[in-house]
Image: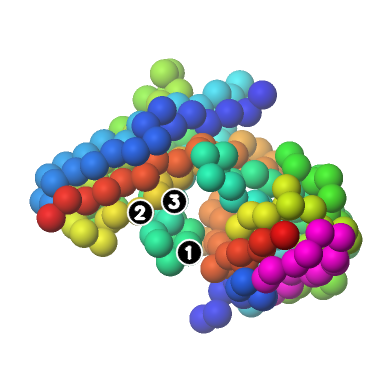
Amino acid sequence: AQTVTQSQPEMSVQEAETVTLSCTYDTSESDYYLFWYKQPPSRQMILVIRQEAYKQQNATENRFSVNFQKAAKSFSLKISDSQLGDAAMYFCAYRVTGNQFYFGTGTSLTVIP
Amino acid sequence: NAGVTQTPKFQVLKTGQSMTLQCAQDMNHNSMYWYRQDPGMGLRLIYYSASEGTTDKGEVPNGYNVSRLNKREFSLRLESAAPSQTSVYFCASRGAPPGPGANVLTFGAGSRLTVL
């Protein structure tokens, strides 16, 4: 079964601090893609960052970076210099070959001024 | 740059009523998807369409039908709405390789459906 586990339903961080959101997944495939999506109160799903499993280098997008541990099937998201606009629900997801994407249950991030 | 457009954004139905959620994308993407989002359950795939003329069931297809009208449009129909179908529905699309949208889902703004 393809599963994604986000073990932290809620997280909080002080503005300007760093926070890490956890994600583990379960697949027997060797080639796949990993994603973090952000869902602010507007409800829009926004791609934050993506990682190809065949790449060893961790992806980075400005203040967002990932720690991809393929052997451990772990894909955490680090947000540096947190801003009030980072407050949102964050979803981890992956896609193996084929059409289906699998999503975790989400982590609600609160940013404290 | 509309991307993925869903209508309506909000809808209230009575049990047993029918309705269709419309979705259109202007990115020339091949694959289109319908998800539902419920608290504590993430996004669950209802149906998807890998290309025009094809549709496949996802994780939670019961109670729904879909139509891939053409490459742009993918509609979701509830024939006889039930309270268990109260949810937020998202349409998404994905381009074919090797384009930049090949391995990424682009989402619509969502449709909140309440069934009384």
SS majority, magenta: strand
Compare marks 3 and 1 and give the one earlier in the sequence.
3
Look at the image and name its color scheme: rainbow
Residue A76 lies left or right of residue A63; in this view the side is right
Tag 2's secondary structure? strand
Magenta region, residue range:
B11-24
Tag 1's secondary structure? loop
Q: Nearer the viewer, residue B115 or A88?
A: B115
Please state which amino acid type lies under the numbered disc 3: Tyr
Estimate the x, y position of residue A28 in percent, counting from the top left.
Answer: 61, 21
Q: Distance between the residues labelled 2 and 1?
A: 10 Å
* CB within 8 Å, label 3 to label 1: no
Which residue is denoted by mark 2 in the rendering?
A88
Q: Distance between the residues labelled 3 and 1?
A: 10 Å
Which residue is denoted by mark 1 in the rendering?
A44
On whether disc 2 and disc 3 are found on a single subunit, the reply is yes
Please state which amino acid type lies under the numbered disc 1: Gln
Please state which amino acid type lies under the numbered disc 2: Ala
Which residue is denoted by mark 3 in the rendering?
A37
Tag 3's secondary structure? strand
Residue at (40% x, 49% y) in the render: A89
Please report, as a chain letter, where disc 3 is located. A
Residue at (44% x, 32% y) in the render: A6
Specify the quadrant of the image occupied by residue B66: bottom right
Q: Nearer the viewer, residue A46 or B78?
A: B78
> Can residue A10 be found in the magenta stretch?
no
Residue A54 lies left or right of residue A101; in this view the side is left
Estimate the x, y position of residue B33 in percent, counting from the top left.
Answer: 69, 56
In the rendered image, the vertical position of residue B77 relative to residue B57, given as above or below: below
